[in-house]
Amino acid sequence: MFSPSDYDFALPPELIAQEPAAAREASRLLHLAPDGAVTDHAFTELAALLPADAVVIANDTRVIPARVRGHKSSGGGIELLFLEPEPSTPAPAGSAAWRCLARARRPLRPGQRVDIDGAPALEILTERAADGTVAVAAPGDGLAFLDAHGHIPLPRYIHRPDRPADGERYQTMFARHPGAVAAPTAGLHMTPAIAEQLAARGIALATLTLHVGWGTFAPVREADLRDHRMHRERYIIPEATAALVATGRPIVALGTTALRALEAAATGPATVAAGPGATDLFIYPGSGHAFQVVSHLITNFHLPGSTLLMLVCAFAGTDRVLAAYRHAVAARYRFFSYGDATLLHRLPADPARV
C-alpha cells in the first residue's frame, strides 16, 4: 500500500499519446461504475453518465509557455522551466524572481547569466535548492518574456518538440488565468457542444483556479509514500463555486487538480472556503484523507507510480482502478496528457475498501 511499486502497471509505449485526438470530442471515455463494472464509451456520452443534478467543476488555469532554452556565456546549453513567481526573493530593478527547474551540464551559480536568443539575458539569483530548483530574474513580471520566448511545456513522454498548434490544443476551453506549467488534461476533452449537453440535463458548470505546478507531476523518489512531500500549488475558489458546492448537489471534479483544490479547501462535508489558498495535500490509499466534497471524477489515465494515480486509487479503490487500467491497455486506449479519459466514482469511506 505504501510502496510506489504497488501502483505500477504494464503499458506498451505505443499507447502513450504523442498527438491530441483529431478533434477534442473524439476522445474515448472509460467508465468505472460504482459496482466495479468497466464499460467503454465516447467522451460525447459523458452527460448521460452523470447525475442529472450534478455540478461539474473545471480548472480554468491557463498553461504558460514556461520552457525556455538558452545558453551560458561559455556556450553550454541551459533549459529552464518557469514554475511560479517568487516575490520573496529580491530581484534587480525592472525584473521579477521566478522559481525554476534548471537542466544544465554543470551547476549554476548566483550571478550567472543565461543568454536567450533575441532577448535580454536572465540572471540566476540563488543556489540550487534541495528540491532542485533555482530562482531566476526575468524581465518585467516574467509573463510577457515567456509569451515572447518560451515554449509550451509538453511532458517529457511526448517525444517531439512543441508546435504552434500545441499552444491551443494544450489549453482547455476554460483556460483564463495564466500560471500553470501543465494542462489540467481532463478539461482538454470538453467542448462547448458537450457543455450544452450537460446543461440540457440540468448539470451545472463551474470553475476554480489551481495553477498546476511541479507538485502535480514530480516523481515519488522515496521507497515509502509516507515520506514523500508534495510541492505547494496555488488555488482560488470563487464565491459562486463555493455556493454551488454548498447546495449539496453531487460534485463532479473535471480533473485531479480540481479535486485536489476542492478537497484542500473543504471545511466540512459539502462545504469549501471561498478565496485564495495553497495546498501540498498528498492523497493516497492509507493517507487517512476522507473525501468531503467530490463524489465523481473525470480524469485522464496517469503514469505508473505517480501521485495522480495514487489519488485516483484512493478515490475509487486501488484494485478496481488497476483492473480498469489493465482493461484500458487491452482495449488500446490512449494514455496520459493527450490521451483518453476515465469517469470514476467515490468509494464509501471504508478504509478496508481503499
Image (cartoon, rainbow, N blue to C red):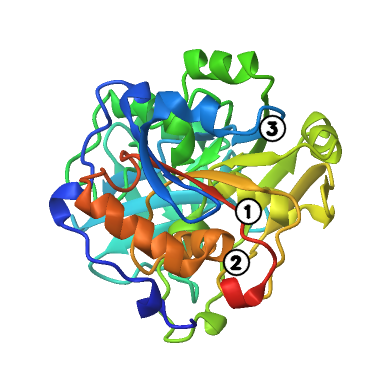
Identify the residue position indicated by label 1 in the image.
260
Q: Nearer the viewer, mark 1 or mark 3?
A: 3
Secondary-structure class at tag 2? loop
Task: Compare residues 238 and 255 and report the one nearer the observer.
Answer: 255
> Mark 3 Cα within 10 Å, few/some/many (few <14, many 20+)?
many
Q: Which mark is residue 54?
A: 3
Q: Residues within 10 Å of mark 2 (few under 14, many from 20)?
A: many
At 17% across and 42% down in the image, what residue appears? 160
Asked if labels 1 and 2 touch by Cβ distance under 8 angstroms, the answer is yes
Name the front one of labels 2 and 3: 3
The answer to whether residue 112 is visible is: no
- Closer to the N terminus: mark 2 or mark 3? 3
The residue under label 3 is which amino acid type? Ala
Q: Which residue is mark 2?
A: 283
Depth check: give the residue in front, 260 or 124. Answer: 260
State which quadrant residue 244 falls in. top right
Q: Which of the 4 image quarters holds residue 341?
A: top left
First in sequence, mark 2 or 1: give its number.
1
Q: At numbered mark 3, what does the secondary structure look like: helix, strand or loop? A: loop
Whole-percent x, y for residue 54 in the image: 69, 32
Residue 283 spot, x, y in % from top left? 60, 66
- The kind of residue on which mark 1 rests is Arg
Q: What's the distance in space between the residues labelled 2 and 3, CA to CA? A: 24 Å
